[in-house]
Image (cartoon, grey):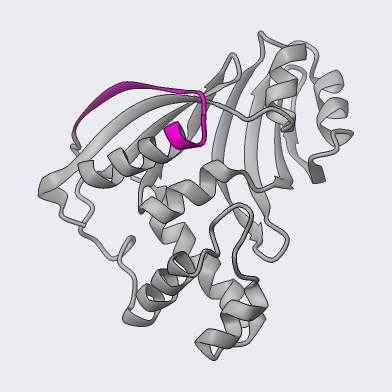
């Protein structure tokens, strides 16, 4: 990625209906939320893993609603105070994350969520960001581009560089439709084509995705 041509875009994007976050904001519109990160957990079953912090005066009711939502597979509290809770949640891995992976765009975490909209800071080439926003338009994702300009961040470091083997694996996964919804190829089929075990490929893909999605200062 050429840092001299990298851009920083700020967008607000609404979570799709049916996810626990969208329904939570319908019932508790005044809550405050911050997403520390979200990454794939189980690539075979398309389950994502997030660490999230919520602030609200009715924390106990919020915890129960999240735990009982049908899109939530696992929920565990990391820290809790009277008006604040930090937790780990595993849920359906949304189209949004796969779109970011396919386009090679980094998300600057944490992500603030307000009124059911996530406020993303996206870092990549202008071409990659434009491609991502085009995908959102094609899928009728509710989003708004708030600002875009030259990025102040230097991205040419080892944190975001893939090895030759990792690059080949990612290119193959994208070209064969592993990150499409619905998926065009299973994890096992992809592993067979790459000559790897399913478990080894799963570990490798999670490492690749972390490098290509999370931007940390």
Residue 148, position as x, y percentages in the image:
24, 27
Check the image and report above or below for 160 versus 127: below
Q: Is residue 190 left or right of residue 104?
A: right
Asked whether 147 falls inside the magenta stretch, the response is yes
Residue 186, position as x, y percentages in the image:
65, 71
Residue 78, position as x, y percentages in the image:
73, 41
Check the image and report above or below for 162 versus 70: below
**Residue stretch rendered in magenta on the structure:** 137-149
Residue found 26% across the figure and 35% down from its top: 8
Check the image and report above or below for 107 versus 202: above
* Closer-to-camera residue (139/12): 139
Residue found 66% across the figure and 50% down from its top: 49
Q: Tally the numbered discs.
A: 0
* Closer-to-camera residue (168/160): 168
Residue found 52% across the figure and 64% down from its top: 177
Quadrant of the frame with the C terminus? top left
Q: Is residue 37 left or right of residue 130?
A: right
Residue found 29% across the figure and 31% down from its top: 9
Q: Residue furthest bottom?
A: 195
Q: Is residue 194 left or right of residue 17?
A: left
Observer able to see residue 88: yes
Asked whether 187 falls inside the magenta stretch, the response is no
Q: Quadrant of residue 163?
A: bottom left
């Amino acid at each position: 990625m050429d840092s001299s041509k990298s851009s920083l875009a700020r967008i607000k994007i609404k979570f799709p209906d049916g996810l626990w976050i969208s329904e939570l904001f319908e019932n508790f519109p005044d809550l405050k939320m911050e997403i520390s990160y979200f990454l794939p957990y189980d690539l075979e079953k398309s389950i994502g893993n997030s660490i999230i912090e919520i602030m609200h005066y009715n924390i106990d009711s919020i915890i129960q609603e999240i735990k009982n939502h049908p899109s939530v597979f696992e929920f565990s509290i990391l820290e809790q105070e009277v008006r604040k809770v930090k937790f780990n949640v595993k849920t359906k891995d949304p189209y949004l994350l796969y779109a970011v992976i396919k386009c090679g765009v980094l998300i600057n975490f944490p992500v603030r969520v307000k009124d059911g909209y996530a406020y993303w800071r996206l870092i990549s080439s202008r071409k990659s960001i434009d491609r991502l926003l085009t995908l959102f338009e094609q899928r009728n994702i509710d989003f708004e581009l708030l600002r875009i300009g030259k990025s102040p961040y230097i991205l040419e470091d080892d944190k975001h560089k893939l090895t030759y083997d990792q690059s080949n694996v990612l290119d193959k996964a994208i070209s064969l439709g592993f990150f499409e919804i619905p998926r065009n190829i299973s994890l096992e089929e992809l592993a067979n084509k790459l000559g790897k075990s399913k478990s080894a490929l799963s570990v490798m893909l999670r490492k690749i995705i972390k490098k290509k999605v999370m931007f940390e200062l």
